[in-house]
Amino acid sequence: MESKTILITGVSRGLGHGLALACVERGDTVLGLGRSAATDLEAQSNFHFAQADVAEAEACATALDTLLSERARLDGVILNAGILGPIADMRDQSVDTMKNVLEVNLWANKTLLDLLLARDLTIGQVVGISSGAAVNGNRGWGGYSLSKAALNMLIKLYAKEREDIHFSALAPGLVDTNMQDQIRAMPDDAPFPSVAQLKQATGTDAMPDSTIAGQRVLAALDRLPGLIESGEFADIRKPPLTD
Ligand SMILES: NC(=O)c1ccc[n+]([C@@H]2O[C@H](COP(=O)([O-])OP(=O)(O)OC[C@H]3O[C@@H](n4cnc5c(N)ncnc54)[C@H](OP(=O)(O)O)[C@@H]3O)[C@@H](O)[C@H]2O)c1
């Protein structure tokens, strides 16, 4: 396979780290953008990192200048950086708390896309890392669900404007990361049924570690342009990705 150049946000740990590792190992050039890097990735000659909080537009612009420099093509953009926010009932989550989650999971991605699309750059594929929470509406997932549902629509809207790029939103399935640690820290008697389900999935094939998940998600990303229309949402656990 021809080697690609792929920009990934949030590569310090978790799924973004697993994705970056999978790309680097198959010979792609990875451009990582986030608040911190990871030493194993930084040791690789085909990994480049620029520091930025994705919620800070000016820092992102500077980081993209550094990473993209004279580059004319990005084969892939993976908008992965994200936060969970509190798991709590809607009435217990303030608007400000939810705004903070949307700042990172939604608006930061709009800023990054605007910065990228304004450049003289050919882009092959843009993937927003979404979640089953975008469509499930499970109790307690308030700000996170809203952010991922809106991310799905953000991707759909950009797809209408840029027909030369394949856009998709992908739910990566469960991945054993810090985000799951946060969920596992919830008390067993919490009134949120999906917390217990996620605790039960820990250690099973339904919740791989971030290295295995990175490989699986990368394989799914490669197939998405041939499987779904630009702008659509797909879940790695469901057709057409399981067909
Ligand atoms: N884990 C799951 O089961 C699961 C399921 C569905 C969807 N997802 C999605 O998968 C993506 C990755 O999540 P994860 O589980 O890997 O979480 P994670 O282990 O908490 O990692 C999140 C990554 O995002 C980065 N990040 C967070 N806020 C940032 C900011 N303001 N600026 C720059 N980078 C920031 C973190 O970097 P720092 O080192 O700077 O904090 C870290 O690299 C998220 O979009 C999440 O919604 C995860």
Image (tube, rainbow, N blue to C red):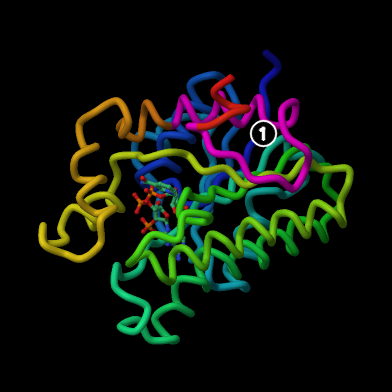
Question: Can residue 74 be seen by looking at this rendering?
Answer: yes
What residue sits 29% from the left and 40% below the top? Answer: 176
Q: Is residue 179 left or right of residue 236?
A: left
Residue 39 in percent (x, y) is at 34, 40
Quarter-of-image position of residue 118? bottom right
Q: Where the C terminus falls, by quadrant?
A: top right
What residue sits 69% from the left and 61% below the top? Answer: 154
Q: Any magenta on residue 221?
A: yes
Q: Is residue 1 above or below residue 115?
A: above
Residue pointed to by mark 1: 5
SS state under label 1: strand
Q: Where the N terminus falls, by quadrant?
A: top right
Q: Nearer the viewer, residue 184 or 126?
A: 184
Q: Is residue 233 above or below residue 75?
A: below
Q: Is residue 97 above or below residue 196?
A: below
Q: Any magenta on residue 45?
A: no
Quarter-of-image position of residue 229? top right
What residue sits 72% from the left and 49% below the top? Answer: 69
Q: How many C-alpha atoms fall within 10 Å of the one at disc 1: few (<14), some, or many (≥20)?
A: many
Q: Is residue 199 left or right of residue 189?
A: right
Q: Nearer the viewer, residue 230 or 133?
A: 133
The total number of labels drawn is 1
**Residue type pointed to by label 1:** Thr
Residue 66 in percent (x, y) is at 64, 54
Per the rendered image, the range of residues in magenta is 214-237
Residue 232 in percent (x, y) is at 70, 45
